[in-house]
Image (spheres, rainbow, N blue to C red):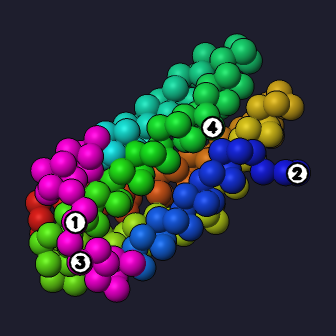
Amino acid sequence: MPLSLSARVSILSNVVALGALALAWSGWPAEPPFAYNLHKALHIAGVVLFAGNLVAGPLWIAYAWFRDDGAHLPFAVRTLVDADIWITTPGLHLTIWNGLAMASALGGIQVHPWLLRSMVALLVTSALALVWVVPAQEGLLAAVETRDPAKIRRAMVSWSVGGTLISVPLSLVFWWMVNKG
């Protein structure tokens, strides 16, 4: 079965994000391209988009699942898939690239232990996304199209567990970012 556009965008996005983290490890960029406050505003906007969709998407899926009328869940899953392209991915890249620019202004990721821990957590998040969440979301999309309750239930469990696991390292990154420790 060919991958959806959302899955292809997610895979490419994760590869680019891993490249960004590798660049940060090497010390790039040496100087932020824009004023620190602009990078900060773009970083916060990215966090709102990225984290907001990570919270709102599962809520819509849960709402549609518990409505249990068969009409809402396929629409909610397709909307989630589209939102990953138009909201989650841009939010992720605004967060990472502007975060790296701010980190360079603060001396780089190696200077601050919380930035280094955040980088490791983002690597874990990316790995979980690539090996679990993206395939689980593709499975959920395929399952809702069949309208087979057993397939949908299995796909929902896999997607829900993967989505919950992926939120753990992201929650730690958010905590470390806010507390700088």
Who comes first in sequence, dot 2 or dot 4?
Answer: 2
Q: Residue at x 33, y 45 (%)?
A: 46
Task: Report x, y in % for residue 171.
Answer: 31, 55
Q: CA distance from mark 3 to mark 2?
A: 43 Å
Task: Report x, y in % for residue 174.
Answer: 25, 55
Q: Which residue is mark 3?
A: 30
Task: Report x, y in % for residue 89.
Answer: 49, 47
Q: Amino acid at mark 1?
A: Pro
Secondary structure, magenta segment, majority class: helix
Range drawn in magenta = 23-45
- Mark 1: secondary structure: loop
Q: Nearer the viewer, mark 3 or mark 2?
A: 3
Q: Which residue is mark 4?
A: 81
In the image shown, does 108 or 4 lie closer to the viewer? 108
Q: Identify the mark at residue 32; answer none if there is no mark.
A: 1
Q: Which residue is mark 2?
A: 1
Lateral position of residue 36 relative to residue 130, left or right:
left
Q: CA distance from mark 2 to mark 4?
A: 16 Å
Q: Residues within 10 Å of mark 4 (few under 14, many from 20)?
A: many
Asked if the residue at tag 4 contacts the one at tag 2, i.e. Cβ–Cβ closer than 8 Å, the answer is no
Who comes first in sequence, dot 3 or dot 2?
Answer: 2
Who comes first in sequence, dot 2 or dot 1?
Answer: 2
Who comes first in sequence, dot 4 or dot 1?
Answer: 1
Q: Residue at x 72, y 15 (%)?
A: 71
Q: CA distance from mark 4 to mark 1?
A: 33 Å
43 in the magenta segment? yes
Q: Residue at x 33, y 53 (%)?
A: 95
Q: Amino acid at mark 2?
A: Met
